[in-house]
């Protein structure tokens, strides 16, 4: 089935046709009224001066004044209409252009930008600004040429030839400058986006002295734009100079021929003056068109980009709201390839969660966890397969509706300029009770109250006025706002201290009681204590899925996928607890089969837990196998297993037992140190 294209842009502009027709008719009247000056001059020279009749002169002045006033009023009304048209266009298309820009960032993985809004502004300014007048006035050029023919066929012929020649120059201008101007536009957009992105990352730039490199990169793109612009301006400037010369020379030629005709008695002196003025009017739109050509090309490119962007926007914003889902999650054969890539980042991912279940999503870096999270919340659409919430494909569920039932905390949190209250209420006004309830659940209420303006504290762009941990906790409160049925938390504890992490785990317990389904991506172990199930993602495929303890037990002997973080005592304790959960699961024979049908890793001891400290596991019997190097990570892991701070020597001794394959003694030493 071919996707229906959104024709909002062309439809909206079509609706403007009547206004443009009106504006063109105004233009006709204005152009005719412009004949006031030449006709006045003609009458003064031919009637007043020869007859010395001052009454006629007064009458002519009054008629000219009325005519010029009418012209000024019409011009005023024309500009009034165009200003209103500009606002109307903005109201009609602005929201859709912004939405489409945001969606294209989301779906096509493009660098975040609001080019759609910029393009709309370019098109709008062109259509409703002074640059459109030469195009609207151009159709009247033949009227003026016709009048010249009436004054004398020679004058008409010279002016027509001149107009054709100038039109040819205008065409040459279009053909020669189109490509460089389009290239300049492209370079310019890249340079501006680059500059915007740099400004957003000011901290990193300043701290690591990246400024010269970034400026160099920006310069390269900007110079590209300047070079192409220069090329177009050189050509345009030359053509413009030739045009000016030809136009002025034509004016002189017409005046000279008219003077000859006057001498030969074929024309009056007044007609000679009038012909010169009319000639100027006839050729003005052609000359103006050349000078405003750049604006026209810019607007045309902007129109092209905007229509491509809007074509993919949803045809209608209307949707039938669906009832609150219970929270059943079903991921069916999901494969995903990032735009611009050919390698699937997720391959045939399948799993199901009942409403109220919680899942820990773990896996090595770049295994596709965040991508899966974005699919689960409906931000990106799988290439094949479906992610369903209560049987409804989230990708097909209108975002504004489904979003009410989903809580999402992305890795980079993404807060907005505004107050804490607005941020928690997802940038709406928000019911105060609901805002406080979400903050309480995220354990952040007291922290907010301690801020100078409490919930009304302005947090700055992206939450710049908050610490990393505060941002994460406010992001969590935003995710919890409105009691969502499904929560997807992407490394929610990455910036949290112990108190923050305890609050997070408390929130997970509360959510469980409330029946919400929670999916949490974890690199640090604490949160895994609160989940029912664990899914291990490796290289974009499900490596293992099942009950937490069983999966963790099966992970024995593989390089660690979760790390004890930061040297915090609780972290170490948690890491140890997760390890112990693995060991206990082993001891009680909880090992099951993996969801993918893969058997558990070849066990080496079945009577007690085998601890692996990264790298290939050591053979407990023989001590054979290549021991991994005693890295800082392994030191940390040993300390986490011990649950307290060991001296370097103690760590090395325990490690010695490990590398010798003396697991029992190692366990004893670990317990001793408890
Ligand atoms: N917008 C994108 N365009 C192209 N490739 C992308 C995009 N986003 C992610 N990727 C690629 O997809 C792969 C998976 O990324 P993803 O962020 O899902 O991994 P992850 O498991 O969450 O990693 P981490 O644990 O480091 O957060 C990576 O190789 C990454 O480079």
Image (cartoon, helix red, strand yellow):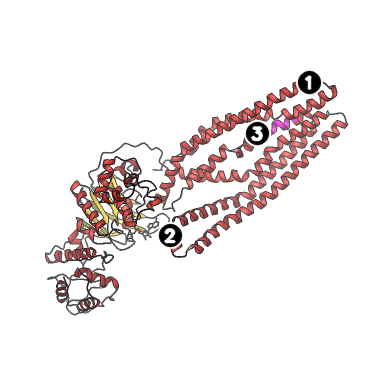
Ligand 1 has an atom within 8 Å of the beta carbon of the residue at disc 1: no
The local secondary structure at tag 1 comes to helix
Return the x and y of residue 536 as percentages of the image width and height: 26, 60
Closer to viewer: mark 3 or mark 2: 2
For label 3, the crowd category at 10 Å Cα-Cα, with few meaning under 14, some 14 to 19 and many 20 or more, is some
Q: Quick check: is 144 in the magenta stretch?
A: yes
Above or below — where is 51 with respect to 399?
Answer: above
Going from the N terminus, do you reach mark 1 or mark 3 first? Answer: 1
Q: How far apart, in angstroms, are the residues tagged by discs 1 and 3? A: 34 Å
Q: Which residues are magenta?
A: 139-147
Q: Quadrant of ligand 1?
A: bottom left
For the residues marked 3 and 2, what is the alpha-carbon distance in whole angstroms?
A: 56 Å
Assign the N terminus to one quadrant of the image.
Answer: top left
Which residue is found at the position 70% from the left and 25% from the top?
65
- Snapshot quadrant of residue 70: top right
Q: CA distance from mark 2 to mark 1?
A: 77 Å
Disc 2 is placed on an element classified as helix
Total number of numbered discs in the rendering? 3
**First reached walking from the N terminus: tag 3 or tag 2:** 3
In the rendered image, the residue lying farthest to the right is 264
Label ID, residue 203: 2
Residue at 51% across / 54% down in the picture? 190
Q: Is mark 2 within 8 Å of ligand 1?
A: no
Name which residue lies at 61% across and 49% down: 178
Residue 366, placed above or below residue 42: below
Of the two numbered discs 2 and 1 in the rendering, the one whose residue sits closer to the viewer: 2
| Residue 184, x across and y down, in percent | 57, 52
Nearest the eye: 595 or 630: 630
Marker disc for residue 139? 3
Question: Along the horizontal axis of the image, is 143 left or right of 546?
Answer: right
Give me the disc on residue 56.
1
The answer to whether residue 77 is visible is yes
């Amino acid at each position: 089935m071919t996707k229906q294209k959104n024709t909002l842009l062309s439809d909206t502009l079509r609706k403007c046709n009547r206004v443009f027709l009106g504006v063109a008719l105004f233009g006709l009247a204005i152009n005719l009224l412009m004949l006031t000056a030449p006709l006045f001059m003609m009458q003064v020279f031919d009637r007043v001066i020869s007859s010395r009749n001052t009454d006629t002169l007064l009458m002519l002045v009054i008629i000219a004044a009325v005519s010029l006033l009418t012209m000024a009023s019409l011009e005023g009304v024309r500009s009034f209409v165009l200003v209103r048209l500009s606002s109307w266009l903005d109201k009609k298309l602005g929201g859709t252009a912004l939405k489409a820009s945001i969606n294209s960032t989301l779906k096509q993985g493009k660098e975040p930008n609001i080019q759609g809004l910029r393009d709309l502004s370019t098109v709008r300014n062109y259509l409703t600004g002074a640059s459109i007048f030469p195009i609207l006035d151009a159709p009247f050029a033949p009227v003026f040429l016709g009048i010249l023919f009436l004054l004398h066929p020679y004058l008409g012929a010279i002016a027509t030839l001149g107009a054709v020649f100038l039109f040819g120059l205008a065409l040459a201008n279009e053909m020669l400058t189109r490509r460089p101007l389009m290239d300049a536009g492209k370079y310019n957009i890249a340079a501006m986006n680059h500059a915007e992105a740099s400004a957003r990352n000011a901290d990193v730039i300043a701290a690591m002295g990246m400024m010269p490199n970034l400026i160099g990169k920006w310069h390269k793109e900007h110079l590209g734009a300047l070079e192409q612009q220069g090329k177009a301006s050189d050509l345009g400037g030359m053509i413009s100079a030739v045009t000016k010369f030809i136009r002025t020379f034509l004016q002189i030629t017409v005046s000279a021929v008219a003077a000859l005709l006057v001498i030969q008695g074929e024309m009056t002196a007044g007609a000679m003056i009038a012909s010169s003025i009319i000639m100027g009017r006839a050729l003005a739109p052609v000359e103006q068109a050349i000078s405003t050509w750049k604006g026209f090309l810019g607007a045309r490119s902007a129109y092209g980009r905007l229509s491509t962007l809007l074509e993919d926007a949803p045809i209608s914003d209307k949707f039938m709201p669906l009832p609150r889902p219970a929270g059943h999650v079903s991921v069916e054969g999901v494969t995903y390839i990032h735009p611009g890539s050919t390698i699937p980042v997720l391959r045939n991912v399948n799993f199901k969660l009942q409403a109220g279940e919680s899942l820990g999503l773990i896996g090595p870096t770049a295994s596709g966890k965040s991508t899966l999270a974005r699919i689960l919340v409906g931000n990106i659409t799988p290439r094949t397969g479906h992610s369903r919430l209560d049987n409804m494909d989230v990708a097909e569920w209108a975002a504004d509706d489904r979003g009410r039932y989903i809580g999402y905390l992305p890795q980079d949190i993404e807060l907005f300029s505004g107050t804490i209250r607005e941020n928690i209420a997802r940038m709406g006004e928000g019911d105060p009770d609901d805002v406080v309830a979400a903050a309480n659940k995220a354990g952040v209420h007291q922290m907010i109250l301690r801020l100078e303006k409490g919930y009304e504290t302005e947090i700055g762009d992206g939450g710049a006025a908050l610490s990393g941990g505060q941002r994460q906790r406010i992001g969590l409160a935003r995710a919890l706002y409105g009691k969502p049925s499904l929560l997807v938390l992407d490394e929610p504890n990455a910036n949290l201290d112990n108190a923050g992490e305890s609050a997070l785990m408390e929130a997970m317990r509360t959510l469980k009681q409330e029946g919400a389904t929670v999916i949490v991506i974890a690199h640090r172990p604490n949160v895994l204590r609160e989940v029912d199930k664990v899914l291990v993602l490796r290289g974009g495929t499900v490596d293992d899925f099942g009950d937490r303890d069983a999966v963790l037990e099966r992970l024995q002997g593989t390089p660690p996928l979760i790390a004890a973080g930061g040297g915090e005592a609780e972290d170490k304790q948690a890491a140890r607890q997760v390890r112990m959960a693995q060991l206990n699961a082993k001891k009680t024979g909880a090992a099951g089969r993996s969801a993918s049908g893969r058997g558990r890793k070849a066990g080496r001891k079945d009577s007690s837990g085998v601890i692996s400290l990264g790298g290939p596991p050591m053979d407990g019997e023989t001590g054979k196998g290549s021991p991994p190097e005693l890295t800082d990570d392994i030191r940390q892991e040993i300390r986490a297993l011990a649950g307290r701070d060991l001296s370097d020597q103690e760590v090395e001794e325990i490690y010695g037992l490990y590398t010798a394959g003396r697991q029992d003694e190692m366990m004893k030493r670990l317990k001793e140190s408890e």
